[in-house]
Image (tube, rainbow, N blue to C red):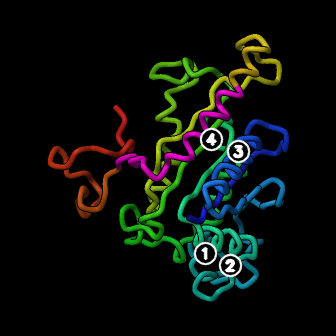
Amino acid sequence: MNVLIVHSHPEPDSLNAGLKNIAIDTLQAQGHHVEVSDLYAEGFDPVEGPQHYPHRQDPVYFSALTEQRSASDHDRLPADVKREISRLERADLLIFQFPLWWHAQPAMLKGWFDRVFVYGGLYTGRQRYDQGHFRGRRAICSVTTGAPQTAFGPGGRGGDIERLMWPIHYSLYYMGYDVLSPFLSHGIQGGGLSYQAEASFRAHLERLKLDWSRRLTQLEEEKPLRFNGWSDWHQDGSAKFPVSPLHSGAVIS
């Protein structure tokens, strides 16, 4: 199996980097081939804009969708985007390793989504969701949070983690991926925040590393999260409820 790890953390000695390295070692020990996109180390530019398109389809008004499609059609995508797409095309499993910052992924990783999942090349009006370009492939997020697990349940101080993760999960499903439940490393204290004594915290980190390594050996047996597909929607995009069950977090009461 070919695996791509998209790593988004600026500190090489962080837990995120450690979990990335554990994934490399564990998966390679299983005989899998692993590639890494280390966004900070490689200096990936997360800001989409006209500066990336010297041969504009529309030189007057910049539309990301228009320029992405034109660049895809004419093999003029920026070199860093072409590199990332090549890595994606080789990968049977996609792993994202990142911290939860301001209730979402870091801006670096959001920008990776903005620039790499190019319109026309990797998705179109009909090539989405369960008909997406990457259907049949799997994706999982490994995420660290500062607050402890108890803060991320329904009504918790940190916000319901399922709702916080929904945008990135749904974006991956939008591209066709089978999305696995995330691996969540809670309570990663730092910057003056402390939730437990130092010795207990260190033991907590070691347990998380072991749990992640074990999880990685079982991914092929896991069932993906459930989302609605084309057969569940009317032509205008509205849901065929109550005929079709709701498997999408798009509707939150």
Amino acid residing under circle 3: Ile
Q: Residue under label 4, please give it.
A: 213
Q: Does the magenta portion include 197?
A: no
Q: Tell me the distance, in whole angstroms, between the alpha carbons under discs 1 and 2.
A: 7 Å
Q: What is the CA distance from the residue labelled 1 to the residue labelled 3?
A: 35 Å
Could you tell which of marks 1 and 4 lies nearer the N-terminus? 1
Spatial separation of the CA atoms under disc 4 and disc 2? 36 Å
Which residue is at a point 73% across and 76% down the rendered structure image? 78
The residue positioned 71% from the left and 50% from the top of the image is 25
Mark 3 = which residue?
22
Label pair 4/3, CB-CB below 8 angstroms:
yes
Q: Are marks 4 and 2 in contact (CB under 8 Å)?
A: no
Tell me which amino acid carries mark 2. Answer: Leu
CB of mark 1 within 8 Å of CB of mark 2? Answer: yes
- Residue beneath label 2, please? 77
On screen, residue 253 above or below 120: above
